[in-house]
Amino acid sequence: MVYVFIIPVLSIWVVDFGKDTPYYLFMLLFICGLADISDSYDKGNNVPLYKFVLLIISGLGASWSRNNGSMMIIVTMIISAVLFKRLRVRFLLSCLICIAFISGFELFMDSHYNVEPSPVGESYSVPLQTYVSYIREYTDELSEEETDMISELFSLEPGELAHEYDPMSSDPVKKHFIMQPSDEQMKLFWKCYKKAFFDHPMVFIRGFLRHTYGYFYPGQDCYLNRIAVYSSDFFTEYFSFRYLWVASPLRGALIYYSEWVYKLPVINYIYRPAVQMLIMISLSAFVLSGKKKSFISVFIPSILMVFVIFSPVNAYFRYMLPVFVALPINLACALRSADICVKYRLKKE
């Protein structure tokens, strides 16, 4: 409770967009389910079937909230099947059920609502960002082939594109990349990319580090030095979404409180993605160094968040929400894996 008071993530709906709120809540339920199963398995108790049903439901909720939720859930269940020998069949069946439901849901949505594919640039944040960092430094030395490729795949000329470059976010660059390039166009892009990379590798390495260091360097504040604030309304052709209390005094008070806590000295460091990442890595290493390695399954969703370095924005608070909310559970499981809580209780008795 103290942690939630200091890091008011459970009321983050007041400052965050709709899809992230159900995502981190379902991920929290999923992680709690893994912790419960791990504890029962460690004690040698039978794990009731309903716990796997709850695990599947929470996993599907996370998968349907964000695209990367599917990968997180499926990979976690596969690794858990390896860790828990007695429960291997149940984890694999749970994984197959999740895959079936996720695939079925996507097919249904695609066929009934003609869902258009996401812009290709959304999947290439780091390549686009690093290539434009190269364009920025070598605009006057681009070959004719590179210039033609840029004109074909981007809506801006090389000089204009270089001016749009933001080392902390790839969004200004991605928005100028064409929506659905052909296979031939992508082959041309990768051809130019590889040539530029091998000619100037340090430019690409610097571009990558400028875009990702905030997830590992504790001195970096959150992106824009604040918790992201989004519109309270979200509408599409098919549905409308609105916060429960739009512009209410309660919502305003929670927004003010969240922003005020974020700026407090010392506590501000807990909000920083790099601090949360380093704590998570340290706790994971602590569990792996002990005898009860099965508890590492609880950390898998958080460990997979290391891939956040390939996201569009550097040191972004909302991308790290699953790690933030999982910290108390991860800490408890780390202590449980070493029987520290048990030893302390026995000592008091």
Image (cartoon, rainbow, N blue to C red):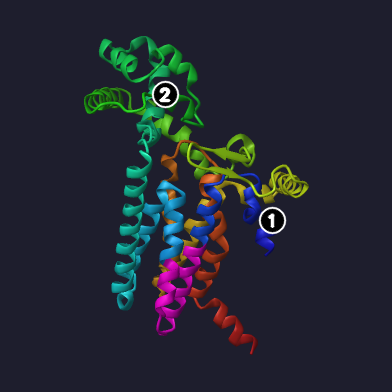
Quadrant of the snapshot with the C terminus: bottom right
Q: Tell me, yes or no, if residue 114 can be seen here.
A: yes
Quadrant for residue 252, please give it: top right
Q: Which mark is residue 6?
A: 1
The residue furthest bottom is 349
Label 1 sits on what residue type? Ile
Of residue 256 and residue 248, the one placed in the foreground of this image is 248
Where is residue 173 shown, x and y percent of the image? 44, 25
Q: Main secondary structure of the magenta part?
A: helix
Q: Is residue 34 magenta?
A: yes
Mark sitting earlier along the chain (1/2)? 1
Q: Give the Cα separation between the discs numbered 1 and 2.
A: 38 Å
**Residue type, numbered disc 2:** Ser
Residue pictured at 52% horizontal, 61% vertical: 28
Residue 107 in the image: x percent, y percent?
31, 48
User: How many residues crowd mark 1 within 10 Å: few (<14), some (14–19), many (20+)?
Assistant: some
Q: Say which element carries label 1.
A: helix
Front residue of this view, candidates 345 and 82: 82
The span picked out in magenta is 29-55
Residue 124's place in the image compared with 258, above or below, is: above
**Observer-nearest residue: 280 or 178?**
178
Q: Position of residue 243 (x, y in %)?
A: 63, 46
Please tell me how many numbered marks the rendered image carries.
2
* Secondary structure under the numbered disc 2 in the rendered image: helix
Q: In the image, is 245 to the left or to the right of 303?
A: right
